[in-house]
Amino acid sequence: MQTLAFFLYIGLLFIFSVSSFSIAVTKIQYPVSRRGLIALRQSDTDQDQDLDPDKLVDPSLKFENPRIKKAYCALQEWKKAMISDPLNMTGNWVGPNVCSYYGVGCVPALDDEQIRTVAAVDLNFGDISGQLVPHLGLLADLGILHLHSNRFCGIVPKTFSNLELLFELDLSNNRFSGLFPTPVLTLPSLRFLDIRFNEFEGPLPPALFDKDVDAIVVNNNRFSSHIPKNMGNSPASTIVLSNNKFSGCIPRSIGRMPNIEQVSFSNNRLTGCLPEELGMPKFLNVLDVSKNYFLGPLPKSLERMEMIERLDVSSNHLTGKVHDSVCGLSALWNFTIFDNYFNEIGGECEKRSRDNLIMQDRENCFSGKPNQRSQQDCSSVLTRPVDCKTIGCQPRDPLILELNKRKPPLVHSPSPPDPQTPKVTPTHKTTQLASPTPPVVSPLPARAVKNFPPKIGSQHSSPPRGH
Ligand SMILES: *[C@@H]1O[C@H](CO)[C@@H](O)[C@H](O)[C@H]1NC(C)=O
Ligand SMILES: *[C@@H]1O[C@H](CO)[C@@H](O)[C@H](O)[C@H]1NC(C)=O
């Protein structure tokens, strides 16, 4: 019963989040306000300050119930910590009726149908600058928080761990910084975490992969260190780690991920051989390991990836043969292998690449093919065979260390999406999670949506040339 109620709740939230997108956003110039700068500094230093609404809220105001009063307190304190709201999104955040505030959605409480509470806050594409305040922890009924494409900075307050119903947190394309926001690790209902395009740094906490979340989207930050070994504990269907500074190997535990469908490791500093376990997850349909320093051959297990549609291994130091057993995978339609040191390719690969498989194979060591590496370049790598059993996860090869040093800085200047045209279509997601540019069209849909989570390149779910 509890579960049913929860899904009903999610359904209501979804209805809210769809309708909220239809509200037109008009571009209004709003003078930059300095109000809140003081509050902002305080919230920076004093996380445990008194959050008692009775002390903060004007006693003459009447609220429909005590939870709405708390929400009023949270939203007003937050508004004070906003420095600029160029689209005037919070312009009507005035007075005790918080359910009529722009971007705020109320539904009957999960535990008491007689009262309404704040279940969703959606300020996507707001271009608002400011900070999150500890008072947001008073929004105990919040299920969805969408802050995609704003200019919020600072950290996620510790009090976020009070948001026991929060299942969808989208902080993407903001200016949050510091270590991974650990308060999210204690959110018991969290299913969807999107913090891509921020400036988070340091390692990912292993606890992230022990959480029961469906999507972990952390691309385009400054995360570093090794990918936690327990990655394979995650029940997630989507994990996007691309465009960070992760080093070391892909954890072997990936082989036991039960639900993984899409995973991107692209553009990090990963090394070692691709683990044999990589081909084991049953439902994997997008795998991107491009732009790293992987060595050695393609794992034999890849030939078991029956669901794989897109496989990108380009721009690594892979060697050996591209086998027919991989090219022949029936769902595969885009197999990107360029910029490696492969030196042999199966006849079926050749045939399919002329037929119905997109297979960019330039800059390898295939003899008799156009646009290949020089013989000298090839032999410098191919004469030093890699033993995957002993190679380990450190880039011991001085060549790679040198390349590592020269690796250009990550692109991190997402151009802001045009706030005047939020082309939002929550029921039909076409987010390219692995895309190097920020998602312009992709505040993420609620869990209730069939098409959730957004597919990496889902607009190409079938081969464009396939017959
Ligand atoms: C912002 O919105 C409020 C309420 O909708 C309105 O009263 C106010 O005039 C707006 N401010 C600007 C600068 O347009
Ligand atoms: C095939 O995949 C590569 C790399 O992931 C991508 O750049 C390319 O656009 C894809 N091709 C098509 C037609 O989608």
Image (spheres, grey):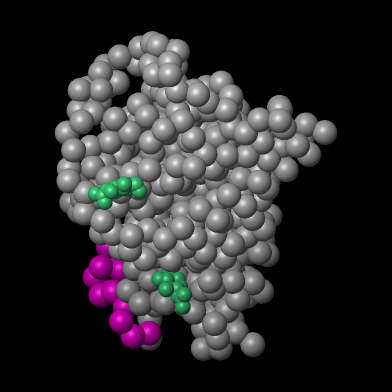
Residue extent of the magenta highlight: 369-382
Residue 378 in view, yes or no: yes
Which of 137/381 is in front? Answer: 137
Residue 381 falls in which quadrant of the image? bottom left
Location of residue 73 with respect to 405 vertically, above or below: above
Residue 65 falls in which quadrant of the image? top right
Q: How many numbered marks appear?
A: 0
| Residue at point 78%, 31% (across, down) | 2
| Quadrant of ligand 2 in image | bottom left
| Residue at point 66%, 50% (across, down) | 448
Which of 2/34 is in front? Answer: 34
Q: Quadrant of the image for the C terminus?
A: bottom right
| Residue at point 33%, 85% (across, down) | 370
Q: Where is residue 386 shown, x and y percent of the image?
A: 41, 52
Q: Where is residue 207 shown, x and y percent of the image?
A: 52, 28
Q: Quadrant of the image for the N terminus?
A: top right
Q: Where is residue 175 shown, x and y percent of the image?
A: 28, 41
Location of residue 287 with respect to 172 vertically, above or below: below
Q: Where is residue 374 shown, x and y percent of the image?
A: 25, 75
